[in-house]
Amino acid sequence: MTDTKTVQLGFRVRPEKAKLLEELSRSTDRPRSWLLEQALDSYLDSQAWQIAQIEEGVADADAGRVIPHERVREWLLTWGGDEEGEPPA
């Protein structure tokens, strides 16, 4: 069963953003609160993904699973040339 409890949040936005939200609400026949919740869900998902990726990268670096700077530099110097190399692994 889905939890139907909600909490009320309030925040300030510039008038032009409020106008755009109202226009979107009318054109999609969706309540502003629904649109805002969808936007918040998307933002929270993307931030959670980004944090997980950063934590994974830090763990890799801590464990020594890195590509030396010089190998990356050498690869980047081949970009755009006839003999563009494969990315170092």
Image (tube, rainbow, N blue to C red):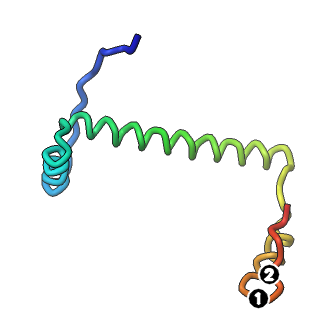
In this rendered view, identify the residue nearer to me: 25 or 78.
Answer: 25
Residue 37 is left or right of residue 82, and the answer is left
Q: Identify residue for label 1.
A: 81
Kindly identify which residue carries mark 2.
Answer: 84
Where does the N terminus fall, quadrant-wise?
top left
Image x and y of residue 49, in percent: 56, 42
Kindly state the secondary structure of the residue where label 1 is placed: loop
Left or right relative to 75: residue 41? left
Q: Percent from the top left, x then y, of residue 51? A: 58, 43
Judge left or right: residue 4 versus residue 60.
Answer: left
User: Extreme top residue here?
Assistant: 1
Q: Nearer the viewer, residue 18 or 63?
A: 18
Q: CA distance from mark 2 to mark 1?
A: 5 Å
Dot 2: element: loop
Q: Residues within 10 Å of mark 2 (few under 14, many from 20)?
A: few
Residue located 31% across and 35% down the image: 37
Q: Quadrant of residue 44?
A: top left
Q: Using a 10 Å C-alpha cutoff, classify the residue at mark 1 as few (fewer than 14 neighbours), some (14 to 19) or many (20 or more).
A: few
- Relative to 34, say whether 60 is above or below: below
| The C terminus - image quarter | bottom right
**52 shown above or below 84:** above
Q: Is residue 20 above or below residue 3?
A: below
For the residue marked with disc 2, what is the amino acid?
A: Glu
**Quadrant of the image occupied by residue 83:** bottom right
Quadrant of the rendered image containing residue 42: top left
Residue at image coords 36%, 39%:
40
Q: Are marks 2 and 1 in contact (CB under 8 Å)?
A: yes
Q: Position of residue 27 (x, y in %)?
A: 16, 49
